[in-house]
Image (tube, rainbow, N blue to C red):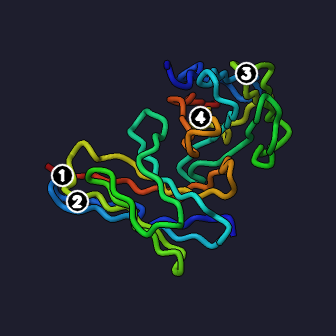
Amino acid sequence: QQQVKQSPQSLIVQKGGISIINCAYENTAFDYFPWYQQFPGKGPALLIAIRPDVSEKKEGRFTISFNKSAKQFSLHIMDSQPGDSATYFCAASMGTSGSRLTFGEGTQLTVNP
Amino acid sequence: DAGVIQSPRHEVTEMGQEVTLRCKPISGHDYLFWYRQTMMRGLELLIYFNNNVPIDDSGMPEDRFSAKMPNASFSTLKIQPSEPRDSAVYFCASRTVGLGNTIYFGEGSWLTVV
């Protein structure tokens, strides 16, 4: 029940295209859903996050869509760029401290020029 | 701020040796986390501290692993004795309450046990 399932494992997109990564969770107590971006040789860094009281959050080219009833959330990268090539992790946590982040398996995104 | 600082960045050691990984969290952060990343298991939370006190160590794989946080600016993760299956990237991360739930990761310590 603590798992967060992420798909696809890898994704190849052409420059300018839309990248979509999906995550699903089981634990309805989760109330914080961040996405992290990780470049090779670096630690993960927060990209964007959402709470379940909204269905969508947009920051620049990055959008999280959240479907509470389906227990699913997704990351959309509009106008994908080669610089977006990285590994993306969804995650979830619960409670006001939200300390115990449960990560998805990761998606390796490659954006071809 | 300099971010979360980890050392060493890379370590190669022989099986059976003791390994000590070090972490300096972001100043003012009161939560500190140790994660392990492998291809097979992804990102796993090993242990986390709040105000220097271990809160949840249920992710520590076995007794060979131990972690300490003697003060607010320093933590260690020790593996004794090390085994080849401990080879992974170990990340330290920190956060503070009041700025959302953003957890800031260090750049990791790449451990290879041969």
Between the C-alphas of marks 1 and 2, the distance is 6 Å
Image quadrant of residue B20?
Answer: top right
* Three-letter residue code for mark 4: Phe
Taking the image as shown, residue B41 lies to the left or right of residue B1, namely right
Q: Residues within 10 Å of mark 1 (few under 14, many from 20)?
A: some
Q: Report x, y in % for residue A71.
A: 54, 75
Residue, disc 2: A13
Between the C-alphas of marks 3 and 4, the distance is 17 Å
Residue beneath the point at 46% across and 66% down:
A54
Host chain of mark 1: A
Taking the image as shown, residue B33 lies to the left or right of residue B49, namely left
Q: Residues within 10 Å of mark 2 (few under 14, many from 20)?
A: some
Q: Report x, y in % for residue B3.
A: 51, 24
The reply to whether discs 1 and 2 touch (Cβ–Cβ < 8 Å) is: yes
Residue beneath the point at 79% across and 35% down:
B65
Residue that protrudes farthest toward the bottom in the picture = A69
Q: Which mark is residue B91?
A: 4
Q: Which mark is residue A112?
A: 1
* Three-letter residue code for mark 3: Ala
Q: Residues within 10 Å of mark 4 (few under 14, many from 20)?
A: many
Between the C-alphas of marks 4 and 2, the distance is 29 Å
Host chain of mark 2: A
Between the C-alphas of marks 3 and 2, the distance is 43 Å
Host chain of mark 3: B
Q: Nearer the viewer, mark 3 or mark 1?
A: 3
* Three-letter residue code for mark 2: Val
